[in-house]
Image (cartoon, rainbow, N blue to C red):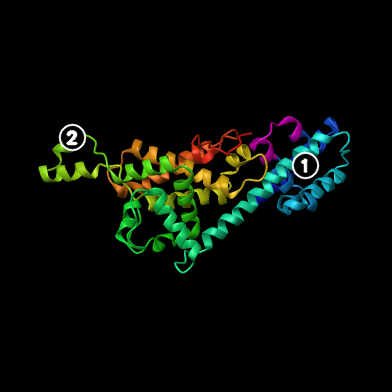
Amino acid sequence: MLIQVCLYFYCKFLWRCLKFVMRKLTGRCELQRICYNTKPGASRTMKIETSLRDSKSKLLQTSVSVHPDAIEKTIEDIMELKKINPDINPQLGISLQACLLQIVGYRNLIADVEKLRREPYDSDNPQHEEMLLKLWKFLKPNTPLESRISKQWCEIGFQGDDPKTDFRGMGLLGLYNLQYFAERDAAAAQQVLSDSLHPKCRDITKEEISKFSKAEWEKKRMDKAIGYSFAIVGINITDLAYNLLVSGALKTHFYNIAPEAPTLSHFQQTFCYLMHEFHKFWIEEDPMDIMEFNRVREKFRKRIIKQLQNPDMALCPHFAASEGLINI
């Protein structure tokens, strides 16, 4: 443990020495070098974020958590601290402002998403009830809901006759995402729902047939399906998107597609993308039955994380829900 601590401070000391030497050789501070030598997007913003966070200056450390309205003043203070003339280096202020908008916006997005996740579904709240009923209408436009408490809810993938119990884990966030998907990308959402309700069987290998009696073989054959509970999976994918956001894994994506602060709409578009991709992945994996869901989900999660490790990666969903998406 002591060796690790010593190594950490030794590396930090070397890094500060290197920064000092580079400043003397180039005549530019680290922020300038990053902005001038790194293309816009996740590569630049993440380097700027690391530089600010690891700085020994309190001003730079706290700049990543200022209020959005204070960003412009913060940039001026940074330029003054670094003795950079804004008239000679006008592009630096613009680049830093774009990076800080993304960095601060990401932190605020986490707060907004967390607030929705912590808010429980309340059946006595008219707004909550209206959203739930809209979800039904978007997914089943030609089938009237007979009553608020009904077994019909199982047709869109809820577990019982009252969906409110299924929102416990993700709170209102799960409902917000499901409604966004069903409303903004109605055709795709209805297709995914239809696929989830109509399992497709695949052929059984001869080796598998030899292991079962005729009755067992018929049962196993029917188990080999792509069917799953649409709404429950949607809430589960919401949990996946939430954890990717909070862990910082989604920074690559948001810093590449949001020219300024990422918003809740960007998060919901990402959810739509994940629903699309998970549905395709589920079919490709061809699980034996729904009991393999956790295995498939974990494999899917690792696949997405690996993609997001590429600094140029953007989970760009080319479908109706992302019409307002801007890729920089």
Tell which of 223 and 142 is nearer to you: 142
Mark 1 or mark 2: whose residue is earlier in sequence: 1
Residue 105 magenta-highlighted? no
User: In the image, is residue 103 above or below residue 150?
Assistant: above
Q: Is residue 80 left or right of residue 14?
A: right
Numbered tag placed on residue 16 in the rendering: 1
Tell which of 118 and 54 is nearer to you: 118
Q: Can residue 165 be seen at all in this image of the molecule?
A: yes
Amino acid identity at mark 2:
Glu
Tell which of 133 and 77 is nearer to you: 133
Residue at the spot x=76%, y=41% of the render?
96
State the image quarter where residue 200 is shown: top left
Assign the C terminus to one quadrant of the image: top right
Which span is picked out in magenta?
A: 35-47
The residue positioned farthest toward the bottom in the image shown: 124
Q: Where is residue 108 in the image (x, y as percent from the top left)?
A: 64, 53
Q: Do the residues labelled 1 and 2 touch (CB within 8 Å)?
A: no
Q: Position of residue 19 (x, y in %)?
A: 78, 38
Q: Where is residue 195 in the image (x, y as percent from the top left)?
A: 32, 42
**Disc 2 secondary structure class:** helix
Q: For mark 2, what is the residue?
A: 207
The residue positioned farthest toward the left in the image shown: 214
